[in-house]
Image (spheres, rainbow, N blue to C red):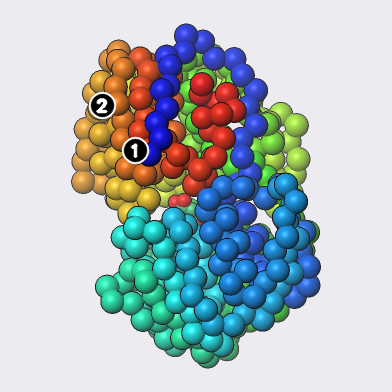
Amino acid sequence: MSFVTVKSLSHYDRTVFCPADKSISVRAVILAAYAQGESVIKNLSLCDDVYSAIDCVRRLGASVETVGSEARIVGARFSGCKLDCGNSATTARLLIGLLSGLNGVYELDGDESLRSRPMRRVIEPLAAMGANIRSDDGRLPVKVVGGALRGCDYTLPVPSAQVKSALLLAGLNASSAVTVGNCGATRNHTENMLAAMGASVRASDNEACVAPSVLHAADLTVPGDASSAAYPICLALALRGRCTVKNVGINETRTAYIALLRSVGADIEYKNVVTGAEPTADICVSGGASRPFVIDENLAPRLIDEIPVLCALACFINGKSVVRGAGELRFKESDRIKATVQALRALGADIAETDDGIVVCGGKKLGFGTVDPHGDHRIAMSAAVAAASGGGARITGSECVSVSYPDFFKTGAVL
Ligand code: S3P
């Protein structure tokens, strides 16, 4: 296990190139592997989760050739096999949905963290469509015996892009349309990519619908990852410095944290905007955030991945910042409510856990501490932001950042 020492920074004025979007890259690999023809994916993320997706689709029969961050993927008719989804819940859940409606027997597994994460949320609605999915306790390993599926009209009990996407991908091969409701707060990359690949897909404010469709290869360019951009953005705000993060995806379903930061006084500007289904911009930040924030149950699903780093920033904003209605954090790569509180408390933060959230009393001076991120990339990077803005830290198991941001400790984002 490796560790890094994060030094306390006195000022921050940087231009940062964040990695390509992990969510979009995983989708691009899976959908291109299933589509008819050759897709060229530019600026594919080279993070561990995307390698897990590539490994899975190669086992399924697709050809994937990569040169740097460009991938040529030739779609295939999948055949039954064993799949290792590594740490990637997106890979596991999307594949369970897609494979349910195809011929073959597929066994999906993952690492220890992924084996602990709930899969019943996809298994149950897919089973209601006629899918044959076996699992001992609603977790991986899972066996999918592909077969005929019916369409469905399903309302998500908890907003989740992965569950929505699993159902939409199953819908490609169902006998009639699949409609998913209560998904307004979830990222819409699957719908965007399905449309780009010729599927019959319709999305409104709170609903997405796919009719049975054939997918055709497409050339796609992946934008920078808005969730990864949150680390240098929050670091610049905590240190009241400046930064520009280049070429970031600014899809509104991913940038609720920017709206929140603006609402508490942060000066954040988009420059060089490029429009499209997945628009991009350079994100320019200067100065700090002047007021504490409240994230409630309506907002939480829209910025769920950014909550740990927002809590790191909250340590440097005078007053009480509150997160509630974010119980889903307990089912991520780690229990992120517990892990965030432990990590920031190890640095001296005044922070407390609630059943479904976190309360941070900002303004207390942080000191040097040792943080164990429990193998969770977002906890390691959030702790690094707090440490660089405060008194420094030793972060153990720091290699876990490779799940989404392999160069985080190398490219000057924090060190
Ligand atoms: C993701 C969706 C979110 C998010 C995860 C990636 C995706 O999870 O937290 O990091 O790529 O669809 P849920 O679908 O569980 O909300």
Mark 2 to mark 1: distance in Å? 11 Å
The answer, for residue 203, to whether it is visible in the render is: no
Question: Does 355 appear above or below 2?
Answer: below
Query: Dot 1 corresponds to which residue?
Result: 373
Which element type, helix, strand or loop, lies under badge 1? loop
The quarter of the image holding the N terminus is: top left
Residue 346 disc label: 2
Q: Residue at x 71, y 72 (%)?
A: 75
Q: Which mark is residue 258?
A: none
Q: Residue at x 34, y 62 (%)?
A: 115
Q: Earlier in the sequence, mark 2 or mark 1?
A: 2
Apparent side of residue 237 relative to residue 40 in the rendered image (left or right): left
Amino acid type indicated by mark 2: Ala
Q: Position of residue 274 (x, y in %)?
A: 76, 40
Residue shown at 42% from the left, 14% from the top: 8
Sort mark 2 into few (<14), some (14-19) or many (20+) by Cα contacts within 10 Å.
Answer: some
> Mark 1 belongs to which amino acid?
Pro
> Taking the image as drawn, is residue 104 in sight?
yes
Mark 1 neighbour density, 10 Å: few (under 14) some (14–19) many (20 or more) = many
Q: Quadrant of residue 354?
A: top left
